[in-house]
């Protein structure tokens, strides 16, 4: 799992969303690092934190748990956590677990 671009672009307005690009597998070996990096990304976020999942190749239950946990932290800070670029397999996983209704999913 790789996290790329965890802060708004330089020169953007303070209200610009924070976009985090994820790639690779989100599994038992990567969830602790992912959790910490997403919590750190919240420090840069204003109103909206977007996770780009278009390059995620696998997401296990632990990965879903991390995303749910970070969403709770984001809400406590007044930040909306949204998903974009959701691969078909992950979209199916979100749908089966009912989590597709919990996260705003952007095109």
Image: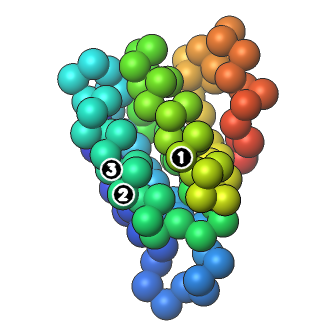
Q: Residues within 10 Å of mark 3 (few under 14, many from 20)?
A: some
| Image quadrant assignment for residue 71 | top right
Residue closer to the observer: 102 or 56: 102
Q: x, y percentage for residue 20?
A: 45, 54
Q: Pick the quarter of the image with the N terminus.
A: top left
* Residue 37 image label: 3
Marks 2,3: beta carbons within 8 A: yes
Number of the front mark, 3 or 1: 1
Circle nearer the N terminus (3, 1): 3
Q: x, y percentage for residue 49?
A: 57, 57
* Mark 1 → mark 2, Cα distance in angstroms: 11 Å
* Residue 73 image label: 1
Residue that numbered label 2 is attached to = 40
Circle nearer the N terminus (1, 2): 2
Residue closer to the observer: 52 or 77: 77
Q: x, y percentage for residue 15?
A: 65, 78
Marks 3,1: beta carbons within 8 A: no
Secondary structure of the residue carrying tag 1 is: helix
Figure check: 99 above or below 19 = above
Q: Residues within 10 Å of mark 2 (few under 14, many from 20)?
A: few
The single residue placed furthest to the top in the displayed view is: 96
Side of 1 where 72 appears, left or right: right
* Mark 3 → mark 1, Cα distance in angstroms: 13 Å
Secondary structure of the residue carrying tag 2 is: helix
């Amino acid at each position: 799992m790789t996290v790329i671009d965890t802060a708004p672009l330089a020169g953007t307005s303070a209200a610009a969303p924070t976009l985090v690009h994820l790639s690779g597998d989100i599994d038992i070996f990567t969830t602790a690092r992912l959790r910490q990096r997403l919590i750190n990304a919240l420090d840069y976020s204003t109103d909206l934190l977007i996770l780009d999942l278009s390059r995620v190749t696998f997401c296990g239950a632990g990965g879903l748990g991390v995303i749910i946990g970070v969403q709770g932290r984001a809400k406590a800070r007044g930040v909306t956590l949204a998903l974009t670029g959701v691969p078909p397999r992950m979209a199916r996983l979100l749908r089966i677990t009912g989590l597709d209704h919990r996260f705003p999913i952007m095109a």
